[in-house]
Amino acid sequence: MTVSRRNVLLLGGLGVVGAGVVSLPHGEVEAKSASRLSGAEMPKPFQSAFVMPPVLAPDKVEVDPADGKPVNYYTVTEKAAMASILPRLQTPILGYNGIFPGPTISLDQGTKAVVRVRNRLPATHPNDGHVLSTSTHLHGSASLPQFDGYASDVTQTGFFKDYHYPNFQPARTLWYHDHGVHFTAQNAYSGLAAQYHLHDPLERQLLPQGAFDVPLIISDAMFAANGALGYDDNTHSGLWGDVILVNGKPWPVMKVQKRIYRFRVLNCSISRSVRLTLSTGDPLIIVGTDGGLVPTPQKVANYRHAGAERYEVLIDFRKYKAGQRIELRNLSNPNNVDYDFTSKVMAFDVTDEPVNTGDPTWNTVPTQLAPTNEVMTMTEKQATKVRKFRVKRNDVTNIWTIDDDSWQDVIASGYKKVAAEVDLDAVEVWEIENRSGGWFHPVHIHLVDFKVLSRNGRAPFPHELGPKDVVYVGEGETVRLLMKFGPHRGRYMVHCHNLPHEDHDMMVQFRVGLKEDDSDPNDPMTAALPQWDG
């Protein structure tokens, strides 16, 4: 591993911020705080108003002459900016269009997108000096390899890259974030993250839309005394902040009508997992997972939600009284680092605003959603191969690996080394085992949606009974996943979405439909090079 790391303040400030604990976690840990803000500057729960990220309008809309499908063209600019996160102090961030979270991109299935990502960041990080090159990953999209955010396919400051997204998949909540090699954690933590919504007719008919279709981007952060973000990855094991943010605001309060709302919940914390529940004890209704709608809604009292997972959840506010406050809380999970207020996420204040009862989704929970989803109707009998992987840590080198392989090995091989070589359209079972000690690992497999077959030989949890692309592999757990590889040929990544683990160096790749020495027209390192943004 050639990249050195220090515990640093990410974007300015004085001194190092941290929990005062090294090589965490080895069990559940609690502390009072991590930030070095004064009492007057430390945000308090439920003092901020909830905000919705803006929806990005396309620059233009055209028709692709090759297939007659519409194409939306967008531009997002990565740049340094100041954000109003704390009550009075400003926080330096890196953001898409200078905001955190970045703007939401929303479009319909069958409408293709070309997203121009312009790197207008400083050339180097203002504190630790790493080069601020970026690679944008649309997480949840079956994109061609050269548009998938391949970690080493980076765009330098002063350049742009046009990313082409096919948007043929069923409706789902995606998100775009930085995936730059060895600095994904710091870049994403700085603010380079946003949602991307893909709609289809079934989802539009069955689930709330517009103002009642609400993105919740949950993250955690720690702050220096001057309001800057702090960064302490505890010897690469993870970062756990003491301030919970939702859409970039600490513990916000949202005003809601007495009706059913749909929340697109993304955990974009770089390490923290959450276990969400309502203060009333009423159920959360899971209607979507990473890859789209679940076959049938699942009512849960709480559920385990790792970094990068998306869950679409219905909350029914009809029975509550005007003026009543309902809290969304975090019960946490083993091997997080918890602080005074990390048990709280946000609050909802019920209003007496009139409800549009002409909207059929205002009081309807569907009895079924997507029973014919291709991923969820697959059976293990279709699989032609079973592959086994272990996620673990090398205690000598302090490097995280999948089996004994790392991204550094991929780089050293000239990007040829693969952990699996699979046929196009092959159906396989991948078994992932975690014996790494006191850590959980959210494992993300690019390109595909998969079905969780089992967890330690038992049925999956009710909340994960839908198509997934990230799986929570908990302490001592073994998960079995079923997936079909396609529709593209080429090289794709597998990695832990505890991003300090990914950066140090828990990422490998697989190759679909090609042999090592085959010509690869979609080589992510050469097929679509960034261009000068002069």
Image: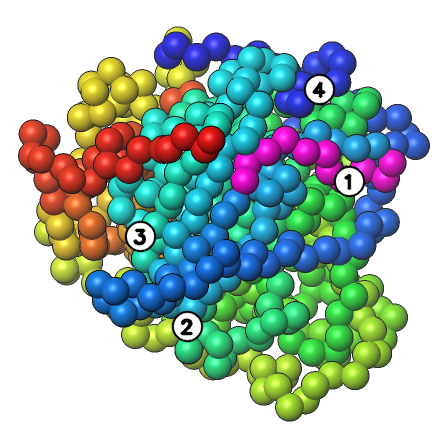
Which portion, as a residue range, is magenta? 77-88
In space, the residues marked 3 and 2 are separated at their CA atoms by 16 Å
Q: Which residue is mark 3?
A: 142
Nearer-the-camera pick, 502 or 146: 146
Q: Which residue is mark 1?
A: 84
Q: Which residue is mark 4?
A: 12
Q: Position of residue 249 (x, y in %)?
A: 74, 46
**Amino acid type of disc 3?**
Ala
Q: Is residue 284 above or below residue 469?
A: below
Q: Secondary structure at mark 1?
A: loop
| Residue contact between numbered discs 2 and 1, judged by CB atoms under 8 Å | no
Q: Considering only order in the chain, which callout, 4 or 1, is on the residue closer to the N terminus?
A: 4
**Amino acid type of disc 4?**
Gly
In space, the residues marked 1 and 4 are separated at their CA atoms by 15 Å
Q: Position of residue 518 (x, y in %)?
A: 7, 34
In space, the residues marked 2 and 1 are separated at their CA atoms by 35 Å
Nearer-the-camera pick, 129 or 280: 129
Nearer-the-camera pick, 184 or 434: 184
